Image (cartoon, rainbow, N blue to C red):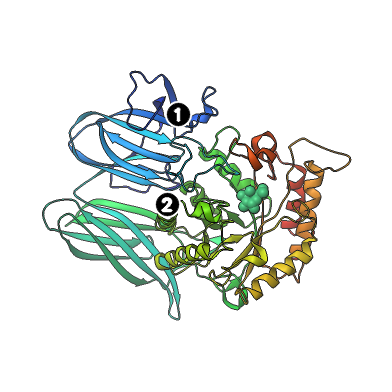
Amino acid sequence: MIRLFDAHEIRPTRELEGLWEFQPVSQQGEIPTDLTYRLPVPGCWENHPELGTYQGVGLYRKKIQVSRRTSLRLEFKGVSHTADVYFDKRHVAHHYNAYTSFEAIMDEVEPGEHEILLYADNTFGEHSALHIENDYYTYGGPIRPIVLEEIGEVYIERAAFFPEWTEQGWQGRWQVTIRNRGAAVRHTDLWLGLDGLHKLQESITIEPHSSLTIERTASYPAAQAWNPGRPVLYTLRTELADGEERYDDWIDRVGFRRVDTQHGKLNINGQEVMLKGVNRHEDHALAGAAFSFPDMMRDLQLIVDLGCNTVRTSHYPNDERFLDLCDEFGLMVWEENHARGLSEQQMRNPNFIRQSEQVTREMVEQHGNHACIVIWAILNECASDTTYGREIYAAELALIRSLDPTRPRTFASHNRERDLCLDLPDIVSFNIYPGWYTDEDPGELMHEARGWADRLGGVGKPMILSEFGADAYYGFRSLNRVKGSEERQSEILDANLRAYLAEEAPLTGVIIWQFCDCRVTESTGWLMSRGSTHNTKGLVDGYRRPKLAYETVKAHFQGVRAKR
Ligand code: ADA
């Protein structure tokens, strides 16, 4: 399943799911004599009993049939973590980062059988500045869908839509990119439509071998707003036509909503919201990072059942199908680029700036139409306490603003009073662990955090506690309520939430670490403190079995014990 709706009705599209041949290889480009495994796609190789801890390069192979001469576009929604793609032995794509999509285009493919080779590499080293040994697992393989499309010489590359609230009511700014891969100038009709609201038609001319980006603003006086409690979505249709004949399309879903941080609050359509949420890793005990749609849906249902109105996609852009679900069910999303806990030295990896900017750009460009995303974030717990780090934080926040001026930006800091970047984002966010890593009092610490923000450039900005929590091993119960027991986790979260959800708490959001247990990198050093190679701070374990803390959080979030 590619999306929750058909992204194309005119462009022929199919998902290349199913069994692919597979073989571990020593390097990208190597072609073994035999591919002995059969693995499901989407999937990660760790789900095969013999490959559970394999870190290296894996080759996936698929033969496809093409019935007529045509150009093909392959879209890989997520390959972990470095992908090289060959079509009939010709290298057609290279991409770094598991959590954003990329394409390969093959011109004028003849009818008959063709071969796709996909090399996926999940090794660590200087070549990978963001996927490193970490408190989550970097799986191997095509963890998200692979799509095969037929395109003509002229086709739609992307359609972005930015809702804007004005004194006259809702407007929408369209940004549509059309590509002409042919050698001749092309004249074509362009249709822009929002189902039930309006259509716009015009003729355009595109030079050969080039892309053209069209920007248009239209008024939508009858539009209804997307609100978390009433998430109204509209189908966006961009179509290309020659006279009456429509030959390409791009369909997405959008919502009209305004997000701002006026008066030190987070406001959606002018209404203050208090974010009550969970941090979620895309990780499942059985599926790894390659979620089936029902698994995704169950996560969403559990999160809603907890009384949450928010999910933070810690620490990378999420699967579009999960974002589609959040759009549909009115869950607000804090989406962040890919990084966790990078020191200044790690941020000085010669590949860091390029790879980090790329994933940031891809995140905003690929996910910007999702109404559910109300905050963009960068660089969780990185070196925001150094002058070098500050340059990077400033550059990435500016990049986001240039791509999308409509959403507030933040980053989750663990640098407390040493942070040098709190003047840069629109919202200040802190990760703190009172009761777990420290013996501090949650209420006092929350006020202290407000003080750090106020002194360090964040005065007047909304504040979110973006992480707090405690480990518990599912099923480990203890009369002594020792650390690691379900009882202790529940108590710690109870104490935290009592303080943070109190009427006078100076907060705009609380986001618990974390929704589900997740596998972490097998390693020496500090990761050895992760019992059973898992971060077990989940409210549910990897199989989604609720721990005691689940009901505790639910009681708070559903308002039984909380005033807010
Ligand atoms: C950090 C980090 C998380 C996780 C957490 C923990 O705050 O952002 O990814 O590692 O701590 O469990 O310690």
The Cα–Cα distance between marks 2 and 1, rounded to whole angstroms, is 35 Å
Residue at x 47% of width, y 59% of height: 233
Residue 437 relative to residue 77: left or right = right
> How many residues crowd around disc 2 within 10 Å: few (fewer than 14), some, or many (20 or more)?
few
| Residue 275 seen from this side | no
Q: Position of residue 79 (x, y in %)?
A: 42, 40
* Residue plotted at (52% across, 22% down): 50
- In x, y percent, where is residue 261? 56, 73
Residue receiving disc 2: 350
Residue position marked by numbered label 1 in the rendering: 40
Specify the amino acid type for callout 1: Pro
Q: Is mark 2 within 8 Å of ligand 1?
A: no
Dot 1, how many residues are within 10 Å of its Cα: few (below 14), some (14-19), or many (20+)? some
Q: In terms of secondary structure, where does tag 2 sit? A: loop
Q: Position of residue 228 (x, y in %)?
A: 57, 61
Figure quadrant of the C terminus: bottom right
Q: Which structural element holds mark 1?
A: strand
Q: Which of pointers 2 and 1 lies earlier in the amino acid sequence?
A: 1
